[in-house]
Amino acid sequence: MSRTIFFEVEILDSKTKEQLCFLDKVEPHSSVGDIKSLFHKSYPKWYPARQALRLDPKGKALRNDDLLQNLPVGTSATLYFRDLGPQLGWTMVFLAEYIGPLLIYLLFYFRVPYIYNHKYTLTSSSHHVVNLACACHSFHYIKRLFETIFVHRFSNGTMPLRATVRNCAYYWGFAAWLAYYINHPLYTPPSYGKTQVRYALIIFVLCEAGNFSVHWSLNSLKCEGAKCRRFPNPSKNPFTWLFFFVSCPNYTYEVGAWVGLSIMTQCVPVALFTFLGFIQMSIWAKGKHKTYTREFKDYPNFRMPILPFIL
Amino acid sequence: MASGEEDGTVEEKETNNKKRTKGAIATAWLTFYNIAMTAGWLVLAVAMVRYYLQKGTHKGLYRNIARTLKFFQTFALLEVGHCAIGIVRTSVIVTGVQVCSRIFMVWFVTNSIRQIQNEESVILFVVVWTITEITRYSFYTFNLLNHLPYFIKWARYNMFIVMYPLGVIGELLTIHASLPYVRRSGMYSLRLPNKYNVSFDYYYFLIIVMLSYIPLFPQLYFHMLRQRRRVLHGEIVVEKDE
């Protein structure tokens, strides 16, 4: 006859060390996620996504799928709680970040009152490239919204509200800034005229297709949350052949699309946005690349994080 | 096999030796740097006092000390490098922001807009900077030499209470005084239309800079106050001016 040993879990505040909650008769195979749910019952305003539980006040937060019996505690565990603040699910985060630029750009495109000189209100630009740029910019964000809703599979992670607000301010602000110049009555079309616009459009379209193909291909990897059983590989789709050379071709294509848009509009704010995005995505790509090489022993050496052969 | 083990410890000793030499070189350089900067700002202080005693007015004082001020304030860019290579344990970004704001004030406001160089606000912030920098650099120097007199530590962590707001007032008044001249001359500005499809208005940029003092100044001020409480109440200090 086996007796199940129950655990006792004590939850203390990380900063004040006062006891917030004491749980007895906790099943040993409970996960940290289960404990968070139990804690949530005593403190309804701290839903599980907002909780960070640690073994040590200054240590790393425990993962939701860690099991109580696998933690280095006796049968009586002490966990430290920190409030991560209000959280948003990834889908909501991305929807907020993408709807803003889409709509804001259109406000400038249609020259809504009070933006430009009143004699230009609700007029339209005489330049063909301005219409094209609006179409491309809008297509870019509509595609992203589509992917957020139908293609991407997000882990159950969340993002703090404050960080989301900050990111939205950045994306929305930049969209307003670059839309202001492209749709300005005094906009100057590209120096090399139709040729420049044509080639830029080709780059843009190819990179958008590439970016979508890579997202689709990443979607077909069987991933459970953040852990994937295989690393991404090229498939029959030629756009995914970039996987031979880089770990994160979705970022490569994204930079390419924005480079296309910069050349098409010949507008410094767009180029600056491209450049800053490139820096940020390179950092993400390097991180992802490191994770891949660490997790998979047979990861191809040939691949670079974001730029083939270079970076 | 035994020699393999010996090689291991020899290598370790070499690395430790290298580290110690690097540490010694870094300390020597930093000591020299801080002594030089203390001396430089002292020279500036003396020059200002002499000018005022001789001429009895502050008019023309800025032009007199301009070259020395520009030299030593610009030299402070090295401090960003110190943080970047790790011989000073402060954040690169914080030091960068502090030094850049000084460089901005010196080169892009006072130096380039001649009409405001005789304003009282210029003298105000230059005097404040001089006092602050002499205290700060001598603090670092004595710290590196491990002989820190209490009055220098006291000065570093108390004078800012008055100096900091005074300096901010001087800087803000100077920028404000420069606005009409900037607007009239259209300096450092780029207007539409141009083939880069971008514009920049230095006048509005200066206004934004002035507004940015509102969130930034209280943060830095209260940070210094917190540091002061920690240091002067005898806790272990890791010199980090954030």
Image: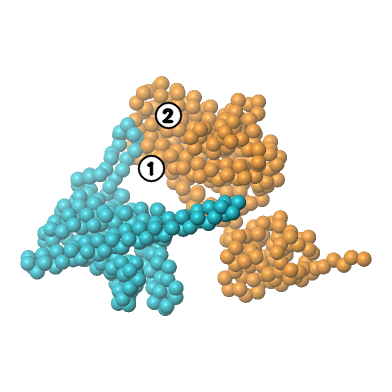
Q: Disc 1 designates what residue?
A: A115
Residue that lies at the very extreme toward the right in this rendered image = A1
- Quadrant position of residue B92: bottom left
Give the label on residue A264, or none. Answer: 2
- Residue in view at x 69 percent, y 56 percent: A64
Mark 1 residue type: Ile
- Give percent across and percent down for residue A75: 76, 69
Q: Quadrant of residue B90?
A: bottom left
Q: Residue at x 17, y 60 (%)?
A: B119
Letter of the chain shown orange in the rendering: A
Q: Chain B is shown in which shade?
A: cyan
Q: Position of residue A103 (x, y in %)?
A: 50, 41
Tag 1 subunit: A
Q: Which colour style is shown?
A: by chain
Asked if residue A184 can be seen in this view, the reply is: no
| Chain bearing mark 2 | A
In the rendered view of the protein, which quadrant contains the N terminus of chain A? bottom right
Tell me whether the residue at label 2 lies in contact with that at label 1, contact meaning CB atoms closer than 8 angstroms: no
